[in-house]
Amino acid sequence: MTAFSKIENFQVRTNQAFLDKAAALEPVLNKRVIRPGRMVRVEENFYHEAVVEEDAPMSELPGMRLGKGDKVIFDFGDHQVGYVSFVAVPMGSHYDAPAYLRLKFAEVPSELLEDAKDYDGWLSKSWIQEETLHLDILPASVNMPRRYAFRYMQVEVLDTSPKYTLQFRNICCDYVSAVEMNTVEPLHSRDDLLNRMDRVSLKTLMDCMQSVFEDGVKRDRRLWLGDLRLQARANYETFRDFNMVKRCLYLFAGMTFADGRIGACFFHEPDFRVDDTYLMDYALFFAPALCDYYEQSKDRETLEELYPQAMEQIDICWDTMLDERHVVVDKGEEFWCFLDWGEGLNKQAGAQAVLIYTMRYAIRMAQSLCDQKRVRQMEERMQILKAAAIEQFWDEKQKMFVSGEMRQISWATQVWMILARVFDKEKSRELILHTMQVNPRIRMVTPYMYHHYMDALIRCGEEELALEEMKRYWGEMILDGADTFWELYNPYNKHESPYGSSMVNSYCHAWSCTPTYLLRKFYKKNEKFRELFE
Ligand code: RAM
């Protein structure tokens, strides 16, 4: 599946005052020096899994001499985001040729078993974290200019000369993030898997909190609205960095498509620029993201300033995306609505549900601002859309919602219809239990979509089940070796990639960080789960 959008002569609408506000909120990044804890070997086992074994402690590095064909893998102990430096010293006769090195940075060990030469995906190969270097003057102090996302750093000596070898010293990473881990109280659950899930979530979120909420620190490295909404929710329960959310909201509002539509994604370097991608669900999420921000921060000025644009997103969908039956028009294979990366997923019914869902937040904001006209208008529209959803998408025989011309049944459609509250709580509960039983073939593949599944279970009063599912999904990712949560995780196909190759998959992806949000918001504060926490 190739999914991107490209618009010739893309025209934008700019609100410079909003962009200036965002610029003024740029965070100062904290830096910390991290050194590798050991050297390791990575091998493939019978099941094609990467297995890591300790090769040598770091104390042996000073005695090691590396010549042509030698390589060493440094393990930094946890996922890092930052700038790497090291010193290469020639040993033996005076060096008579440059040193030629290949460096590879890997978030997970399996990346070290892959060869970039074999890459044939549709995303740019330039995301693969691999470099070759010539060191003409030795000893050399090398400061790598790129920011890497990694736990493992492999240094391979492609060549020196027969007259000298290399000794490596002072290998370190200047780790960067806008927030500090010690500002967040650990979860303290009696169930250690929950503590680990919380810790890995926090690390994922922290690593992605850079100059903006990045989606992934290895790949994309930019702001996506769908990711932002979940990152912000996790942030409110943990780091509570309101300014970063505010900055990102002002960015999205500060530069939009010329017709007012908010872009799905935003570049912040070297200067601010909205991407020419519109995704209906992402644009709509501006409303819940703003509503959450206001309810958490009580920053009324920002609500007042950005509310018109949040409402505008809903108006645009109401005016341009519906047919005469008040049903979202299916744009088929186009990249028009996201929901999930599942192969073949039809988005029509899910898009309708997201539109209904976001109206609930629009109403909440309108109520806060005493905008009665809007409250009434949104309530009326919501009823119309719910009725249309039942009329067009509910299949009474199968007891599930269908989507698209082919009447496809997917997990995503059911989950979003529940979150849209098209049915009451009891009927929604029946629907989710029935869906679990049927296990539709069009499954969920991203932790982003799984988050919404958890949210739906909790909404239906199935908190215990949600906790079990959360442990099965994110817990299994931990058992599979996750130091930070991954962009993609399909328990039915662990090598899945929407990009034609898992080499460019991201393994520290912020939309996967929500267990910390769910655990802290719905379990820790809930009397029913008291025995889980000390
Ligand atoms: C990918 C990234 C990003 C997501 C978009 C839709 O490029 O994973 O996080 O929001 O897809």
Image (cartoon, rainbow, N blue to C red):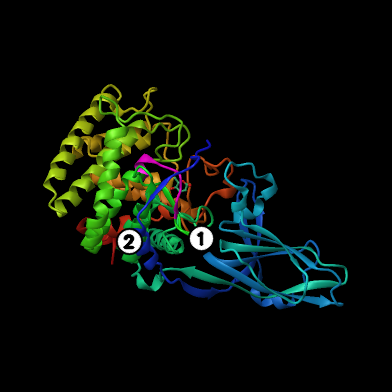
Where does the magenta region start and end?
273-282
Which image quadrant is residue 215 in? Answer: bottom left
Q: Which mark is residue 355?
A: none
In x, y percent, where is residue 10?
A: 46, 43
Other residues around mark 2 within 10 Å, as few (<14) / some (14–19) / many (≥20): many
In x, y percent, where is residue 507?
A: 51, 54
Residue type, mark 1 in image: Pro
- Residue carrying label 2: 246
Q: Residue at x 23, y 28 (%)?
A: 388
In the visual, does 94 lie left or right of 396? right
Residue 459 to residue 19: above or below: above
The residue nearer to you, when weighing 504 against 146, is: 146
Which image quadrant is residue 185 in? Answer: bottom left
SS label for mark 1:
loop
Task: Tell me which label, 1 or 2, sits earlier in the chain.
Answer: 2
Q: Can residue 516 be seen from the camera position used here?
A: no
- Residue carrying label 1: 270
Other residues around mark 1 within 10 Å, as few (<14) / some (14–19) / many (≥20): few
Disc 1/disc 2 C-alpha distance (Å): 20 Å
Q: Residue at x 85, y 67 (%)?
A: 161
SS label for mark 2:
helix
Residue 378 to residue 409: above or below: below
Marks 1/2 in contact by CB < 8 Å: the verdict is no
Quarter holding the C terminus is bottom left
The residue nearer to you, when weighing 405 against 529, is: 405
In the visual, does 533 lie left or right of 174? left
